[in-house]
Image (cartoon, rainbow, N blue to C red):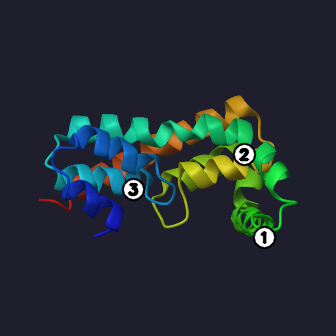
Amino acid sequence: MNPILEWFVNHPAFPPQLAVTLVSMLPILELRAGIPFARVLNLPLAEALLFSVIGNIIPIPFILLFITKIFDFLRPTKTLGGLIRKLENRAMNRSDKIARAEFWGLVAFVGIPLPGTGGWTGALIAALLKIDLKKASAAILLGIAIAATIMSLISYGIFHM
């Protein structure tokens, strides 16, 4: 089990709803880990969806609005400049389909729960490609809804039976 998830399991006084929200806010994990984690914590599906989707959405506006400014500020520094360039290159290497199909490409990228995809990376790519804020927000929210549906079916539905 992931060390972050393990920490929450080993601290049962921590409310499971808050644990699922926080896990879903983390890059890489997002609701792809939040919903299965909610299942491990025996949360009902409705709570799993509510708290994981809320957690996944919280960072998105900040990424869309501020990440390029933060990257511009940090890129010239010796300690973080290399990391920033690496993150930008990694995101832009995944952006070709999104750039061509903009809205639906972003929906698919965020919605298909594969490693390296999701709301965080989708918002980063949208910000770097300068996709319209409203269009990017709508596409990411729709993608999160699709990912939540898929992860719910895997964690609570078809494969759980």
Q: Secondary structure at mark 2?
A: helix
Amino acid type, residue under disc 1 in the picture? Gly
Q: CA distance from mark 1 to mark 3?
A: 28 Å
Name the image quarter holding residue 63: top right
Q: Earlier in the sequence, mark 1 or mark 3?
A: 3
> Residue 131: x and y, percent?
77, 41
> Residue 111: x and y, percent?
50, 51
Amino acid type, residue under disc 3 in the picture? Arg
Q: Please identify the quadrant where the C terminus is shown.
A: bottom left
Q: CA distance from mark 2 to mark 1?
A: 16 Å
Q: CA distance from mark 3 to mark 2?
A: 22 Å
Contact (Cβ within 8 Å) of mark 3 with mark 2:
no
Tag shown at residue 161: none
List the residue tagged with mark 1.
Answer: 82
List the residue tagged with mark 2.
Answer: 67
Horizontal side of 42 relative to 104 (left or right) equals left
Q: Against 124, is 89 above or below?
A: below
> Residue 141: x and y, percent?
53, 37
List the residue tagged with mark 3.
Answer: 32
Q: Secondary structure at mark 1?
A: helix
Q: Against 29, is 82 above or below?
A: below
Q: Please identify the quadrant where the N terminus is shown.
A: bottom left
Contact (Cβ within 8 Å) of mark 1 with mark 3:
no
Q: Secondary structure at mark 3?
A: helix
Q: Earlier in the sequence, mark 3 or mark 2?
A: 3
